[in-house]
Image (cartoon, grey):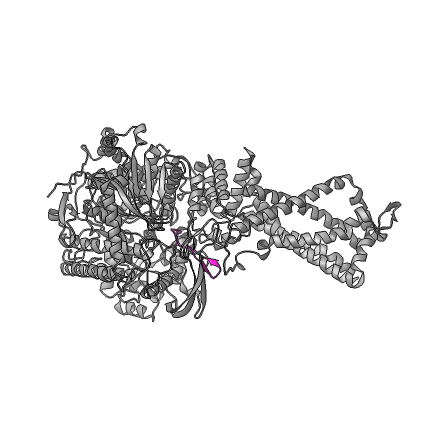
């Protein structure tokens, strides 16, 4: 809890737009408080760029409390940087040393094309959800909430999966750019609950088909996604997705 | 089951099944090989059994098919995985997030394949097709059979070349062990036969199996090199 | 002065909504296909409304500035959602939820709306469960509840500390389903720039594509704003960085009245301010007050020693700790409503008992030692583990070992665009849902009621009331924006506004001006307000606005992605809204809920309402730049409830 100030060099990927070629630019920064968050450090850098009449670095961020899933950034070789169970907005500068060079890259995946600088297009995730990440109920006409008892352990495990924030760190981290952890989190959550079980087979097939179509790679079970996931979503959900998918295909 | 094999999980399903098949082959193969340590008669008997048993004979082309499937789908998936990240990172640090072998399965597979080719030329090719003076038939408990023992031992005991071959075989065994260390658990995971409890068990089991494979196949050249 | 028609239906309070639904006009299925509805925002209100209307057969266009509808800031709500299910058999009922909400809002909310809210609260829980929202459950498989501020029953449903996330993802899943079916056209990374009014009715919006910079128009038979609240006017708040008031403000300038802008909620438990470049404040859920005890040292020298770092909180013995909420409000203790808890914290720190070493010495302790002693660490970890982890990552202190440091922070806007019972603004065809409207929380919102209101509006209120409007619009053919002068004019005005911003070419960054606006707002239109302070604020905001337009610097171009331009657009509106907030606070010569005028307090420091003169909704009409807005009053009538002064001291 001892706050101090450090000097760092930030090496950032700059890319004008989706079509342009990008390059790394280095920016020295002095007197950064170790109590400030990583994105506050980026704010300071951007403020400096604006005063120098340069374009600030574009990066996605919104809630800044680790829940909206909008922030990204591949920092020194890690999705969401070198701390566990945090998003970039929760990463603090106390994780870095005086004199360090910090390399910041956008998520890299064919499924997530760069929009500008560090900002990428993650609409592929929305498309996968539109393919089946729901229970097909309309508003109204549903049974009383307590009419369907759910075992506490199942509700908890479903909640573990439902904690996914859709940030894309799993894809960014995976050496294959696989989206299996993301897809499995939703398939697993809904397969665990009686409400979702009814169309579990259809959901697994449709979501996997959409995932494949959008050019994500294949899971090779390295487990890196689980470790870098800011919400610690477990590989066990991928096993459940495999199970659901295989059973669904067998029944066809 | 329409288009099952065109889906990512379908392709991995085949990887997993062929992997299991190859794992069972390895177990049989290692068991037979370990007879080498029990002397020439024991090994020649085991080898004769393997060479004449009808089930093993039928399984041989199936085994070849297993290899081909495993290699073909591995190549296909790896190619797809490469395409999924058109621009690579300047800096990646995964030493704490995944095991080295899990990230290098294709390279390990290629090492094992290279070894396999050498291995086939050394033994299988000679026994099946070209023959060798070393294989001159011997009598074991009244049965005439090829002297496979002499073919194997001479490879590891022929001076400098024996050293080199021993090195290649140990390298092959270690690569295979690493490959299996990830592949064993991963095959269960891909079939959906894992959860948070079983994952730990399967990983330990896989590591034990990998250790047995790597050390079991390494002991043979080492034994003949040293004794 | 035009009379505001709140269109409250006839009948007893519990019959009003049923009567309304029984007699309202509907649109038949074949006509629904011919009707377009624009919904701006994808939070709880926006996503649930878009999904529900699309399910009915309307053609919906849904917009959000984020990269995905799932990012809307409803996702950050932690603690829970209220409903009058009475699953705990502790005496809850629709009436009691209604009563608590009116009382919590300090008798400044519209009775009929609040009763309807309490009525549909149970349907929300049913709906969410059907969608697969994994609420916490007991071992028997039934739903669990926790208690929240301002209530003496346990009626709050929760999904760990991520209830907002789970409810939003439920609504998002319904939304996604309709997008997949082709019933909703989704426009992410698109920001609304203006409302288009044709012949006195809202008929569409002008937007800016945040990736390409392109200005476009969209037509609809009705427009719904579900664009959230405006407390980012304070710069530092618990809102998301992008949360803004622009949609509401643009609608206000086009004729929608803005109601009670001075009513903002200051949440008592956020992590205190710690640095000059701090970008936002992080909330620690109100649910923590179930098990945490709030205190400051009894002795000033102890507080001083803690600030200097010579004493640690655990060095202070129990008898030297002032559990000021338990002391002042024995009946509710640490679970008093938010406004009361916030004011009490300010009262202590104003007197020099604050514990945080920041320039304003603002901070108090939230201590879990007692709960850990009583229940064990495991229980506390199961209840609040993720919040404790979040706290530790930010502050670098372990809350299991040392008390949490907390202080009030700007959190929610009770004020918003004025709407009638149908959620329709003073512009016909423009509806406002969720936090963006003013209707249900009066002068103070109770915890776990924002999620309830957002989803009530979106799932169960708007889908009915909007039909009553649309029923006589079925003959209106779809308009092509390119062929209508009203759309063209609006587009040109937006382009001119952007050009004006880009051509200032000054020297100050948007954020530096925003930070200064925030300070004025926090110091003078914040927790304690005075006539003199508010007058100064108005002058200072005016000056800052002038400075902004003379000296803001926006690098880059308007025809491409330009984050600084986005921020400048939003700040331009905050600089006008901030002044209206001060004007409203200045005119309201009383204290109520989140609005505390220091001149109007009881001798014990409690808020002093003036029901004779101020029991009304203050709805402001825009009269042009630098012109004093007109005030319209909607008198509040309480028929089903007896108006009292709030008392959390005794049951």
Which of A87 and C120 lies nearest the eye of the viewer? A87
Q: Main secondary structure of the magenta part?
A: loop
Which residue sits at x=47%, y=48%? A111
Classify residue C110 by image quadrant.
Answer: top left
Residue C184 point in image, percent of width and height? 36, 38
Question: Can the viewer see residue C400 in this picture?
Answer: no
Question: Can the viewer see residue A239 in this picture?
Answer: yes
* On-image quarter of the N terminus of chain C: top left
Which of C406 and A175 lies nearest the eye of the viewer? A175
Vertical order, B172 against C164 (above or below): below
Question: Left or right: where does residue C296 sit relative to residue C400?
Answer: left
Residue C603 point in image, percent of width and height? 15, 57
Check if residue A139 falls in the magenta segment. Answer: no
Vertical order, C99 against A79 (above or below): above
Which of C267 and A101 lies nearest the eye of the viewer? A101
Classify residue C356 by image quadrant.
Answer: bottom left
Classify residue C585 by image quadrant.
Answer: bottom left
Which of A32 and A46 lies nearest the eye of the viewer? A46
Q: Which residues are magenta?
A: A65-81
Residue A70 point in image, percent of width and height? 39, 52
Residue B175 point in image, percent of width and height? 66, 56
Q: How many marks?
A: 0
């Amino acid at each position: 809890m001892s706050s101090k100030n450090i000097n760092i060099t930030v090496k950032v990927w700059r890319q004008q737009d989706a079509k342009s070629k990008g390059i790394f630019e280095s920016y020295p920064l002095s007197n950064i408080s170790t109590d400030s968050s990583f994105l506050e450090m980026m704010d300071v850098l951007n403020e400096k760029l604006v005063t120098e009449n340069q374009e600030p670095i574009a990066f996605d961020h919104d809630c800044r409390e680790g829940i909206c899933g909008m922030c990204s950034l591949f920092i020194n070789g890690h999705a969401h940087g070198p701390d566990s169970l945090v998003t970039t907005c929760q990463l603090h500068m106390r994780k870095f040393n005086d004199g360090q060079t910090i390399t910041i890259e956008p998520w890299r995946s064919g499924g997530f094309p760069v929009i500008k600088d560090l900002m990428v297009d993650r609409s592929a995730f929305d498309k996968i959800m539109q393919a089946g990440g729901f229970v097909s109920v309309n508003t109204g006409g549903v049974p009383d909430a307590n009419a369907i008892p759910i075992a506490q352990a199942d509700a908890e495990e479903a909640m573990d999966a439902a904690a996914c924030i859709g940030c894309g760190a799993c894809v960014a981290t995976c050496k294959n750019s696989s989206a299996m952890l993301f897809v499995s989190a939703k398939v697993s959550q809904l397969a665990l609950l009686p409400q979702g079980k009814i169309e579990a087979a259809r959901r697994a097939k449709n979501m996997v088909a959409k995932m494949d179509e959008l050019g994500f790679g294949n899971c090779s079970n390295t487990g890196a996604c689980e470790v870098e996931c800011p919400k610690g979503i477990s590989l066990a959900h991928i096993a459940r997705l495999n199970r659901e998918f295989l059973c669904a295909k067998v029944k066809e | 089951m329409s288009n099952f094999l065109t889906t990512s999980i379908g392709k991995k399903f085949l990887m997993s099944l062929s992997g299991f098949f190859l794992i069972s082959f390895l177990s049989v193969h290692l068991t037979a090989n370990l007879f080498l340590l029990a002397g020439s008669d024991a090994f020649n008997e085991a080898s004769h059994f393997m060479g004449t048993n009808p089930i093993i004979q039928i399984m041989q082309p199936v085994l070849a098919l297993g290899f081909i499937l495993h290699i073909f789908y591995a190549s296909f998936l790896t190619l797809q995985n490469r395409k999924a990240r058109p621009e690579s990172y300047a800096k990646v640090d995964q030493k704490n997030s995944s095991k080295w072998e899990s990230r290098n399965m294709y390279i390990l597979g290629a090492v094992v394949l290279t070894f396999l080719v050498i291995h086939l030329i050394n033994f299988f090719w000679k026994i099946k097709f070209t023959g060798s003076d070393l294989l001159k038939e011997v009598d074991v408990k009244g049965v005439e059979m090829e002297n496979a023992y002499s073919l194997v031992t001479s490879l590891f005991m022929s001076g400098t070349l024996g050293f080199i071959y021993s090195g290649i075989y140990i390298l092959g065994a270690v690569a295979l062990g690493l490959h299996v260390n990830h592949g064993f658990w991963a095959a269960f995971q891909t079939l959906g036969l894992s959860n948070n409890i079983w994952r730990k068990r399967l990983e330990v089991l896989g590591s034990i199996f990998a250790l047995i494979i790597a050390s079991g196949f390494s002991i043979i050249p080492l034994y003949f090199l040293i004794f | 002065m035009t009379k505001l028609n709140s269109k409250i239906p006839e009948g007893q309070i519990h019959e009003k909504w049923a009567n309304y639904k029984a007699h309202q006009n509907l649109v038949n299925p074949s006509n629904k296909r011919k009707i377009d509805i624009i919904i701006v925002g994808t939070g709880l209100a926006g996503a649930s409304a878009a999904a529900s209307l699309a399910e009915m057969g309307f053609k919906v266009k849904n917009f959000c500035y984020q990269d995905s509808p799932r990012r809307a800031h409803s996702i950050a709500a932690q603690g829970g959602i209220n409903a009058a299910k009475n699953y705990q058999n502790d005496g809850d009922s629709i009436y009691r939820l209604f009563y608590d909400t009116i009382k919590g809002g300090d008798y400044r909310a519209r009775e009929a709306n609040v009763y309807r809210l309490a009525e549909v609260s149970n349907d929300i829980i049913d709906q969410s469960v059907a969608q697969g929202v994994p609420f916490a459950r007991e071992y028997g498989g039934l739903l669990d509840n926790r208690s929240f501020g301002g209530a003496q029953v346990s009626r709050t449903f929760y999904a760990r500390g991520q209830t907002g996330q789970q409810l939003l993802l439920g609504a998002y899943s319904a939304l996604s389903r309709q997008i997949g079916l082709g019933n909703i056209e989704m426009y992410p990374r698109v920001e609304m720039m203006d409302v288009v009014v044709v012949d006195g009715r809202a008929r569409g919006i002008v937007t800016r594509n945040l990736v390409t910079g392109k200005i476009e128009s969209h037509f609809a038979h009705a427009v719904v704003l579900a664009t959230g609240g405006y407390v980012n006017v304070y710069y530092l708040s618990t809102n998301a960085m992008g949360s803004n008031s622009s949609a509401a403000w643009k609608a206000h300038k086009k004729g929608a009245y803005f109601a009670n802008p001075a009513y903002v909620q200051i949440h008592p438990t956020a992590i205190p301010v710690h640095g000059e470049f701090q970008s936002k404040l992080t909330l620690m859920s109100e649910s923590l007050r179930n098990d945490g005890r709030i205190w400051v040292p009894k002795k000033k020298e102890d507080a001083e020693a803690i600030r200097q770092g010579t004493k640690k909180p655990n060095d202070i013995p129990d008898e030297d700790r002032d559990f000021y909420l338990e002391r002042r409000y024995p009946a509710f203790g640490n679970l008093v409503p938010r406004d009361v808890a916030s004011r009490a914290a300010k009262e202590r720190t104003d007197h020099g008992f604050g514990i945080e070493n920041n320039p304003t010495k603002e901070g108090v302790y939230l201590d879990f030692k007692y709960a850990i002693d009583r229940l064990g660490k495991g229980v506390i970890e199961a209840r609040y583990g993720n919040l404790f982890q979040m706290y530790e990552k930010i502050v670098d202190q372990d809350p299991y070992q040392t008390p949490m440091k907390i202080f009030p922070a700007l959190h929610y806007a009770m004020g918003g665009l004025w709407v009638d019972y149908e959620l329709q603004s003073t512009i016909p065809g423009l509806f406002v849902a969720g936090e963006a409207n003013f209707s249900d929380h009066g002068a103070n919102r109770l915890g776990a009621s924002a999620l309830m209101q957002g989803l009530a509006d979106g799932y169960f209120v708007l889908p009915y009331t909007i039909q009553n409007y649309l029923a006589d619009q079925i003959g209106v053919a779809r308009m092509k924006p390119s062929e209508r002068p009203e759309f063209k004019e609006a587009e040109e005005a937006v382009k001119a506004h952007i050009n004006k911003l880009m051509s200032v070419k000054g020297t100050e960054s948007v954020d530096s001006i925003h930070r200064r606006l925030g300070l004025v707002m926090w110091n003078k239109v914040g927790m304690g307000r005075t006539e003199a302070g508010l007058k100064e604020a108005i002058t200072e905001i005016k000056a800052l606005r002038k400075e902004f337009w003379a000296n803001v610097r926006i690098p880059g171009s308007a025809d491409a992605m330009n984050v600084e331009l986005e921020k400048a657009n939003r700040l331009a509106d905050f600089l006008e809204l901030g002044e209206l907030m001060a004007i409203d606070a200045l005119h309201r010569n009383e204290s109520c809920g989140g609005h505390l005028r220091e001149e109007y307090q009881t001798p014990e420091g409690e808020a002093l309402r003036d029901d004779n003169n101020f029991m009304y909704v203050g709805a402001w009409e825009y009269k042009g730049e630098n012109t004093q807005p007109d005030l319209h009053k909607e008198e509040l009538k309480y028929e089903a409830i007896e108006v009292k002064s709030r008392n959390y001291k005794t049951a």
